[in-house]
Amino acid sequence: MLSDLPLFPEQASTGAARVDALFMFLLAVSVFFAMLIFSLVLYFAVKYRRRSEAEQPRPILGDVRLELLWTVIPLGLTMIMFVWGANLYFTMASPPADAMEIAVVGKQWMWKFQHPEGQREINELHIPVGRPVKLTMASEDVIHSFFVPAFRVKMDVVPGQYTATWFEATRPGTFHLFCAQYCGTAHAGMGGRVVVLTPTAYETWLSGGATGESPVAAGARLFQQLGCATCHRADGPGSGPSLVGLFGQTVRLHSGETVRADEAYIRESVLYPTAKIVAGYQPIMPTFQGLISEEGLLQLIAYIRSLGGGKTGTPS
Amino acid sequence: MNPVVIPRAHYLNVNYGIKAWLFTTDHKRIALLYLASITLLFFVGGAAAVVMRLELLTPQGDLVQSETYNKLFTMHGVIMVWFFLIPSIPAVLGNFLVPLMIGARDLAFPRLNLLSWYIFALGALFTLTAVVTGGVDTGWTFYTPYSSTYANTHVILTVLGVFITGFSSILTGLNFIVTIHTMRVPGLTWSRLPLFIWAHYATSLIMVLGTPVLAIAIVLVALERVFRIGIFDPALGGDPVLFQHLFWFYSHPAVYIMILPAMGVISELIPCFSRKRIFGYNFVAFSSVAIAVLGFFVWGHHMFVSSQSVYASMVFSFMSMLVAIPSAIKVFNWTATLYKGSIAYDTPMLYAFGFIGLFTIGGLTGLFLAALAVDVHVHDTYFVIAHFHYIMVGGAVMGYLGGLHFWWPKITGRMYPEGWGKLAALIIFIGFNLTFFPQFLLGYLGMPRRYHFYPAEFQVLHVMSSAGASILGVGYMIPLVYFIWSLRYGAVAGPNPWGAKGLEWQTSSPPPTDNFAQTPEVKEEAYAYGPQEVHVV
């Protein structure tokens, strides 16, 4: 019977135990204050129950010291909660530099994944244990939210931009994957599972099945097909800036501002080329809206990242 | 001592007929128009919840289709938030009591007050039409671009209903603010105001300042749906997250529109049934205003995983922690008021006890949602559902029912049956906890909200929740029956059956149309319970 009544979720990521520690602190503080209030109310309600209709208790107006006490103590405790929660949240928003990158596209009502080696999956994500995994996520339609309770990880997937999250699984197993943001009719069915494998089992899984093109190779092909290479020449100045060594660098714009060349910047530059013009270049690039899919964009970015420059994203 | 009788002339029997009610400008009659409308809407919204809880008895989606389920939770949310909770205490009890408590003959703008009700009814009509003609499936939050582009249901009709109803809120808020500023009787200074009035003043500020932003947001949704202008849909160059900012800028403070008046009710009940001055009057009064002001700077805590900047999230987390403090201050002061009191367990006081317990749990679990890293896990799960039902049902509805029982003798001149009242309060308390406590566990386990079907391991907790809901449903039916029964058969109450302080108890029950035969004068502080020779200032 008890197995039918789970009370606490399994922990399967490095972050899970840390989130649970804060949860336990919150729980302890809450239980303490709830019990304090409940027992005081009960005690007073019984002890000072009306014994005769003639009772006229003397008024007590208040006590500033008490007011200060029950303002300052809760304030102090909530500040601990704030700092602890914010600190952890910041870590959760900062993927390690060596994280394995997986591209995620959400659409009504499925999850699509692509591994760095090219494998594609739908509604099922295989990952190795003990290795940080960074997800770069895009939506083809409405807002979705990538949620794996066992990892204590959740991030909205928002159309028109990239969002990211990361985790490091700590043990092999199969865990629920849910869409947490209501996305229409089959929202409850937009789930699947995350399969955590030992590193060797993951290698075996990778080598089995249809290995498609890797995202970098697919991106390189798109780069030629869409004619990007005509202007963005690898060997030097074309009509557009060279993209070699660009990723993660700071770019000076025509307006005098600077921008970091991250996923969001490249996405914007492909879809809205005149939004940010690199200093020294003309606004002549046409838009590629409607010519490239969300998955294609992610592949193009993987290719541009492979041209060097280096670092992956920090918190948005 | 005179035998207790119903006065010969009062606001209910001054004239009869449908016109006498539909064209009334008497705040007390308008309060009853609201009472009838929101009671109807409460049971409509409740019926949707009943079907949902039945569906969730089994993990499979076997009772209704997904489309229907999605429409049910949307209808439940829209109706309960905008057509029950927001008007509940202010438009019914506030309308009835604000003039009586300050010794006025009516609100400052009686005809505007009637207009508020008509606007409310019109808005409700739009939304109910949307429900009857096929429903809407966006969730009560109307998130874009789903609502503005993808949904194929009656979004425009529904948002128009909400938009229209908003004006009723704004007008009621304005009416209260002007009334409280200008129509207090001589001697009723700000520091002598009943805390119910302070709470309604704070609530009115939110209604007037927040509601227009909601109106703007949902009009933009409608415009985007019709004219394809790019405000929220990224395919048209818009930003879907912008909608969330606009929506929650109103809809988080809206939670305080629901809970502040309930806190005002509790601040009346506890002194009366413990025969004690409220402990720390100034702290309770100013904490209402602090909640109203701070409440405008916490909306981003609904958006910690929305792609909002991490630094913005940190600011919102910090502010959300701060807004917890004035609520804690209130709970501590209510508890301290009980100390050395003379405590009676009449039905309204049972609701007040229930409120303190449930609001405490609701408030404390709010800290889990304000703490960033934990919110990431529990956001959009049943943990959130449990939390806000502890606040809105455990808090606001308990306050509303407590208030309704407390002032029922004033409103109708007759008592409800006390035994049935206590029984219903107990059933509601038990049913509520059984419904919503398991949802905290479900949420931390990872059960997402708005799921028509779910993995089998969550079933036991869902069954508990559904069982609780059936008890809760019975609990809500009982007062409906005995309140109606009491109109004819209830014991005659007399002007002040509770021995309560406050101007509303100095006039007859039911009060005359003009409220007071002579304008009363206030010579003492609020809640001057206790030995009469003690005049503490």
Image: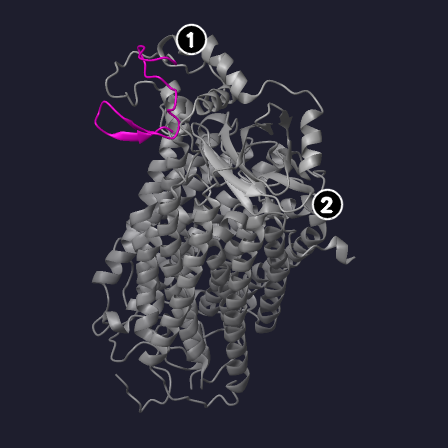
Q: Residue furthest right?
A: A1
Answer with the quarter of the image where residue B58 lies. top right
Query: What is the x, y in percent for residue A131?
Result: 58, 40
Q: Is residue B217 above or below residue B419?
A: above
Q: Is residue A304 magenta?
A: no
Callout 1 amino acid: Gly
Q: Main secondary structure of the magenta part?
A: loop
**Residue neighbourhood size for the residue with mark 2, other residues' Cα within 10 Å, grouped as few (<14), some (14–19), many (≥20):** few
Residue found at x 33% / y 51%:
B297
Labels 1, 2: front one: 1
Residue type at tag 2 = Ala
Q: CA distance from mark 1 to mark 2?
A: 51 Å
Q: Secondary structure at mark 2?
A: helix
Give left or right: position of B137 versus B173.
Answer: right
Question: Measured from the top left, where is residue B516 in percent x and y?
Answer: 30, 69
Q: Percent x, y for residue A118?
A: 60, 23
Q: Which mark is residue B456?
A: 2
Q: Which region shows up in magenta?
A: A234-261
Q: Is residue B331 above or below residue A164?
A: below
B378, above or below B410, in the image: above
Residue drawn where x is 42% and y is 63% of the image: A80
The chain to which mark 2 is attached is B
The residue that mark 1 highlights is A227
Q: In the picture, which quadrant includes the N terminus of chain B?
A: bottom left
